[in-house]
Image (cartoon, grey):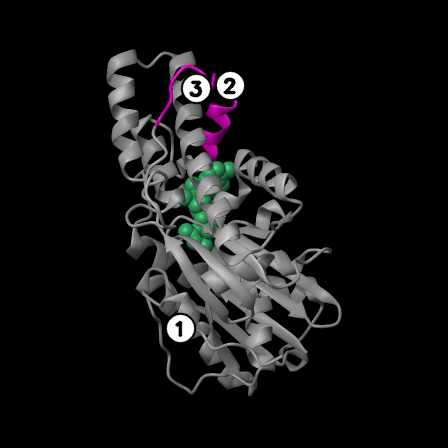
């Protein structure tokens, strides 16, 4: 079985072809970073228009890369939510229409399920069950995962997502959009003993998180200490330490609560080296393991959508002829996949 996957939920156009026997056959990605850079963040209308321009050429490129024709495909999967409604509608319209023209089923994929399953594309995929630390630009969640579609949200951010906090703090520090990776790079040169930022909501029970206060803390620290190169690096380090420590403390709690030792990290912030290292330390301390996708599949991509779509199609799920997008779509409403 071979599936074409299309991702257009935010500022990346991703297209991939996944084969259930041979694995990933093609993977094409176009990032809109330059388009939005002047505005310091994603401009939804510009994102939608750019997806309109890029999706079909990327599909053609993926088909050429895999040396396939439409007759070789068994289905089309597209991200239907959560995300920016206009951007989602581009992928949904193109995906649904192509599936109709090619006379194959179409399946709507949940973007965060795509992220959650991205480590399954690696050589050493995580066995179920596990605790997923889903950290992207739009969502931060701790999820108990017993199987595909068996998701229980244990806790989530009550305000900014971890990636959003990285991006907003980076902007405040004058770094370009998207600031997360740049802030993390700056933090490498920082001295972690100079400033200590709070670890929000770690002194209260439960698994919810809050990251928005760290922006204010950053702004106040800049105001009090200036903005020279070393101070900026030290502040970036203190911010990163605070986000990473908070996620590690909450993840440790989630593992204990569910009596588990296996951790999966996915979503854009799972590319953060410091977060990976600290979660590896946590796993080592309890005799557990950590799994994450290769760096290019941490952020948005078509491969994770093709993979998730394949699982859903194999489960007999597919869509009617309507083109639908779901800007808000809770992950715990997805159907469990029969074993
Ligand atoms: O999963 P993703 O590509 O898009 C969403 O679904 O939101 O995540 C993008 C987010 C951005 O906020 C970006 O700044 C963050 O992931 N990010 C990072 C790193 N790489 C990407 N944050 C911290 N450290 C990184 N190395
Ligand atoms: Zn994403």
Q: Which residue is mark 1?
A: 333
Is residue 238 visible to us here? yes
Task: Report the side of 68 relative to 261 (left or right).
Answer: right
> In the structure shown, which secondary structural element does the residue marked by tag 1 occupy?
helix
Instruction: Look at the image and say whether residue 297 sits in the magenta stretch.
Output: no
Horizontally, residue 188 falls left or right of residue 10, namely right
Q: Of discs 3 and 1, which sits in the foreground?
A: 1
Would you identify the image quadrant in which residue 15 lies? bottom right
Between disc 1 and disc 2, the foreground one is 1
Up the image or down, 136 lies above or below 150; here it is: above
Region rendered in magenta: 181-197
Q: Which residue is mark 3?
A: 233
Q: Which element type, helix, strand or loop, lies under badge 3?
A: helix
| N-term mark: 1 or 2 | 2
| Residue under the image location 36 percent in, 67 percent down | 330
Q: Which of the 4 image quadrants contains residue 50? A: bottom left
- Name, please, the residue furthest toward the right: 22
Residue at horizontal 62%, vertical 43%? Answer: 286
Q: Secondary structure at mark 2?
A: loop
Label placed on residue 189: 2
Determine whether the beta carbon of the residue marked 3 sits less than 8 angstroms from the nearest atom of ligand 1: no
Q: Can residue 194 be found in the magenta stretch?
A: yes
Whether label 1 lies within 8 Å of ligand 1 gets the answer no
């Amino acid at each position: 079985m071979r599936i074409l996957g299309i991702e257009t939920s935010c500022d990346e156009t991703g297209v991939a072809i996944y084969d259930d026997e041979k694995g990933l056959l093609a993977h094409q990605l176009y990032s809109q970073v330059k388009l939005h850079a002047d505005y310091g963040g994603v401009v939804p209308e510009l994102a939608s228009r750019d997806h309109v321009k890029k999706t079909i050429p990327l599909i053609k490129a993926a088909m050429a890369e895999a040396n396939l024709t439409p007759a070789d495909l068994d289905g089309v999967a597209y991200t239907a939510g959560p995300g920016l409604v206009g951007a989602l509608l581009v992928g949904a319209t193109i995906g649904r229409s192509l599936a109709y023209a090619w006379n194959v089923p179409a399946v709507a994929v949940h973007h965060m399920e795509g992220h959650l399953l991205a480590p399954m594309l690696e050589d050493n995929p995580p066995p179920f069950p596990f605790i997923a630390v889903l950290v992207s630009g739009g969502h931060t969640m701790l999820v108990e995962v017993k199987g595909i579609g068996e998701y229980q949200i244990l806790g989530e951010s009550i305000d900014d997502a971890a990636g959003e906090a990285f991006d907003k703090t980076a902007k405040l520090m004058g770094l370009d959009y998207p600031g997360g990776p740049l802030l993390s790079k700056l933090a490498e040169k920082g001295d972690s003993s100079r400033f200590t930022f709070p670890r929000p909501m770690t002194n209260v029970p439960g698994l919810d998180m809050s990251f928005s206060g760290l922006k204010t803390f950053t702004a106040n620290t800049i105001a009090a200490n200036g903005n020279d190169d070393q101070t900026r690096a030290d502040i970036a380090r203190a911010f990163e330490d605070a986000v990473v420590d908070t996620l590690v403390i909450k993840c440790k709690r989630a593992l204990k609560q569910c009596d588990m030792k296996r951790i999966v990290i996915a979503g854009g912030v799972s590319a953060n080296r410091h977060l990976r290292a600290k979660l590896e330390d946590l796993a080592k301390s309890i005799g557990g393991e950590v799994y994450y996708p290769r760096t290019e599949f941490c952020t948005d991509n078509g491969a994770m959508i093709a993979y998730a779509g394949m699982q859903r199609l194999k489960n007999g799920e597919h869509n009617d002829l309507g083109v639908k997008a779901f800007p808000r779509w809770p992950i715990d409403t997805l159907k469990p996949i029969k074993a």
